[in-house]
Image (cartoon, helix red, strand yellow):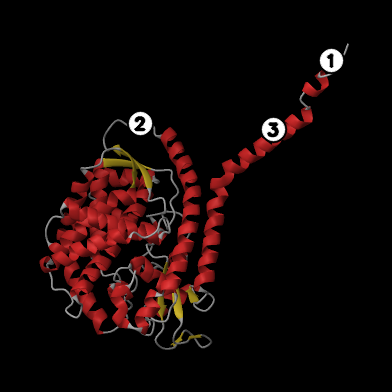
Amino acid sequence: MRDAGGGGARARPGGAVLIAAVTVAVAAVLASLPSWLPRAVVALRVAIFARVNGEEGVPIPGDLVGADRFREVYSHPAADGRSAGAPLSDLFWYWLAPGPHVHQEHLEPGDRYEEVARATRRILARPKGEAAALAERCASRVLNEHGPGLARLRDLMMPVWAEFSYELVFGEPCPRHARDLIVANADDVITALKCCGLRHMDRRDRLTGYLLDRLGDVRHPLPESLTKQEQAFYLQGTFFNTAVVQMSEAMAHLLMAIAQHPDVQRRLAGDPADDAYLDRVIEESMRRYPLFGIAHRITSADIAVDERTTLPAGSVLCFNYPEFHATGFDDPDRFDPGRWERIAVRDANHIPFGVTANRPCPARGVAPVAMRAVTRETLRRFALASSAAHTRSLPNRGPCLLAPRGAPARRAGGRLVLLRLRDGWEDVWRSLVQLVCGTYMVLDARRQRLAAAYFENPRTAGEEG
């Protein structure tokens, strides 16, 4: 006799197959997220930025100006405007507040810019040997605090350059509480710039207050045309924002490249006195991962590019460093220090510190020798390995495994696989954070109009943020 309830108790084979297929499909989609979602979110974020700020810039290299005229246009006397007249400036001023109106990079050409630039050159003026010794001391003090294991290279390097900048400015070793203030400020600036978090003005204000109290201790005269508060803003923006951030980023890129190219690392560690090779590694790192993405300038007069093309006064020129650094090189995406044995830097599309005729980086003399010293001190202590993504923007801050130099070699294959997986999944979450924070900040910057409001009424300059 048939069980009346038996037929209903049996699972339908077709239903089980469907459930299994859906489960596999969902799992496949989830597993694939790191390979496509971050790129899609970045594209959306770029589209939002362009929609809010407008397509105002002339891309160089581009249809109007090719790579062959990049230096010529960049060096033109009329490519001298910095912030006035470009809505894009509102966003940079927003990220750099407080005090973007006296930040050296954002001052308009004129007497104030010249006075501030002279003050910066005086503070940075150190013999190369002295600068290298200072960088080595700072690196040694900071690296003494770190053992082997996983590190974020940008985080590892930031205290080094905080101490380095402090001693350049004040002429004495950096106290720990001052270093903490500088690192908190610089980390907040770069985190906001990369849209990985919102600004924390309390961290920035604490450093401003500290600098106001220390103005009388600065080794060299500060610009007299600036008020006391503006002098503190100048020090904060030039030395404790830009210098610390850019040098930390430069070192993170350099050490990540070394970590991911064992042959390069073996040669550097095996012959620490080979400065020529290390210089080529540094050049290649700065070519492949330039610190600047886009440098914008506003033309103060017409610029005749050729017989057919004239850039009118008021144009916003967007100089694309990564694209310029990739043009004219064989296999430009490959990290190859050896290319600089065959190519002279002065003849290549390579301007890591800008062009001499248009606001070159004031640290272009001291930065390479200091980077060399810090690299040697790092490699003297640690062997580096990393499988994390290495991009120019470096939002992951450079995850890297540090092992004691000279210790018995241990296979790191499994840890590198896990590091790569972890980095990929972090990128999924990070891209969503960047979308939310970036959208909020670009809209808030547009609302506040810091640069535009300043040029409409310069007396309100101290009220930003």
Q: Nearer the viewer, mark 3 or mark 2?
A: 3
Tell me if label 3 and label 1 are in contact, CB under 8 Å: no
Discs 1, 2 touching: Cβ within 8 Å: no
User: Which of label 3 and label 1 is nearer to you?
Assistant: 1
**Amino acid type shown at disc 3:** Ala
Taking the spot 40% from the left edge, 46% from the top edge, the residue there is 260
What mark, if any, has residue 3 been given in the picture? 1
Relative to 335, residue 292 above or below: below
The picture places residue 262, in percent across and down from the top left corner, at 38, 43
The quarter of the picture where the C terminus appears is bottom left
Q: Is residue 283 visible?
A: no
Report if the CB atoms under discs 3 and 2 are less than 8 Å apart.
no
Specify the amino acid type for callout 2. Arg
Residue in the foreground of this view, choosing between 32 and 354: 32
Q: CA distance from mark 3 to mark 1?
A: 29 Å
Q: Quadrant of the N terminus?
A: top right
Question: Of the residues shown, which amino acid type is indicated by label 1?
Answer: Asp
Which element carries disc 3, helix, strand or loop?
helix
Q: What is the C-alpha distance between the residues marked 3 and 2?
A: 41 Å
Residue 410 numbered mark, or none: 2
Q: Which mark is residue 458?
A: none
Task: Place residue 11 in its image quadrant.
Answer: top right
Q: Nearer the viewer, residue 223 or 67?
A: 223
Could one spot residue 335 in this view of the protein? yes
Which mark is on residue 20? 3
Closest to the observer: 365 or 102?
102
Q: Give residue 109's quadrant in the image.
A: bottom left
Q: Upstream in the sequence, badge 3 or badge 2?
A: 3
